Image: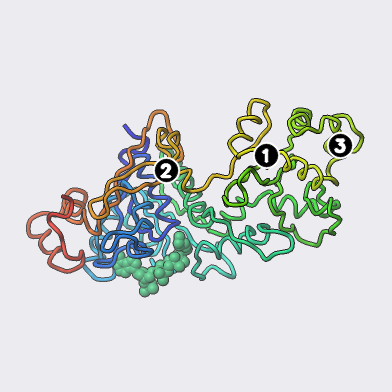
Amino acid sequence: MKALEGVKILDFTHVQSGPTCTQLLAWFGADVIKVERPGVGDATRKQLVDVPGADSLYFTMLNHNKRSIELNSKNETGKEVLTRLIQECDVLVENFAPGALDRMGFSWERIQEINPRIIMASVKGFGPGQYEDCKVYENVAQCAGGAASTTGFLDGPPVVTGAQIGDSGTGLHLALGIVTALFQREKTGRGQKVLAAMQDGVLNLCRVKLRDQQRLAAGPLKEYSQFGEGVPFGEATPRAGNDSGGGQPGRILKCKGWETDANAYTYFITQAAVWEAICDVIGKPEWKTQEGYATPPERLDKLNEVFDAIEAWTMTKTKFEVMDICNPLNIPVGPILSMKELAEDDGLRETGTIVEVDHPERGSYLSVGCPIKLSDSPVDVTRSPLLGEHTTEVLSEVLGYSGEDLDRVIGSGAVGEVKADAAE
Ligand code: CAO
């Protein structure tokens, strides 16, 4: 048995933010029925195509374990089928541009009329207010949520991060909102509206930067490298390069081979508790007791000197040797791993964090499996559906259409061209 077995999700999501949410729910056992525009489908099916004619990795990696039904929600029969789906499902998840569902004729009020127990969960770019009508993509959210202004180096422009905190991050927030609403429904019997705005999600992940914004009022942020460099602080939380962001100073440092390998680096944290071990490892035993170096506050204005000395040592070792030497001493370090190294990591494959999936159009590909492991609800990652692969199955098995009624719906054109053998 899976944790969310029996929960039916009407998945009206597209691109990345919504699909990451419903993919998680599918991995936890929910029956996720993805509704797609006939003949077109989720736009990502045909974005960044690497195998001509096949669904892109962009799509396949975000839509595992789902069923796909083609449905034109803007014509009469399509609306009839959508209404039936709303009646049958526990949750409707969507990340359309603001107002799109209302324009289809499915406002929250109408949806509640159809099924008072349903949970309607939405990703939008912004919450209610000035920007609520804006369309938003990943990097816009990173910029509007405070990530870009606090990422990068002091002397450079704002930088966006490769981690999709706006899309996948908000998908995660939404998934938590959905299971929480399902839990509350157990007691109240009522559905509710769940909103995760991308700006809010990014800001939540940038919480420590808002912490620092307020600390500025009490003086310079002494753990930031710019403090030791004598660069004055301005009015807003500055970009901090690779500074650690916490109370234990850290940096990215070069390792052996950095001249030719773009990822021959390590993250190194000068945790106070292991300062003496660090001094011994890098060949600076005198720093253990020397005035100006022995305690964390004394070192804050010398971070460049300290990290230069540590780097002189890390440059004599590979990033993995640094780890092998430091880990037994409890010195927190981490190699900068490339995507190639992660893809080839046997340990990640053993835990199911990296999975190899077979697909009829594209053969085998790698994906990121479920990052959350439940001991009593194991995850089996299955391939993403072809467009409309389960249209007939959903119409008959989930919605109970049969005989002439089924023929009428199929003949109406509302559900695309039904492929009888699509699932084979
Ligand atoms: N049948 C008929 N029409 C359908 C349909 C279906 N099955 N599925 C979608 N449509 C229609 C929508 O109703 C909408 O029509 P209207 O413009 O007439 O209302 C139209 O398709 C386009 O939908 P959209 O505006 O959501 O899509 P877009 O490509 O123009 O915008 C995006 C994409 C992501 C910018 C926008 O959806 C958005 O801002 N979403 C909220 C924030 C979000 O999730 N952003 C992250 C996206 S990437 O991870």
Q: Which residue is mark 2?
A: 182
| Amino acid type of the residue tagged 3 in the rendering | Tyr
Q: Residue at x 35, y 44 (%)?
A: 26
Mark 3 vs ligand 1: CB below 8 Å? no
SS for dot 3: loop
- Which percent across, then down, holds residue 13? 38, 58
Q: CA distance from mark 1 to mark 3?
A: 23 Å
Mark 1 vs ligand 1: CB below 8 Å? no
Of residues 10 and 288, the one nearer the viewer is 288
- Which percent across, then down, holds residue 39? 24, 67
- Which percent across, then down, holds residue 417? 16, 65
Can you tell which of label 1 and label 3 is closer to the viewer? 1
Q: Residues within 10 Å of mark 2 (few under 14, many from 20)?
A: many
Of residues 66 and 295, the one nearer the viewer is 295
Q: Which residue is mark 1?
A: 316
The answer to whether residue 98 is seen in the rendering is: no
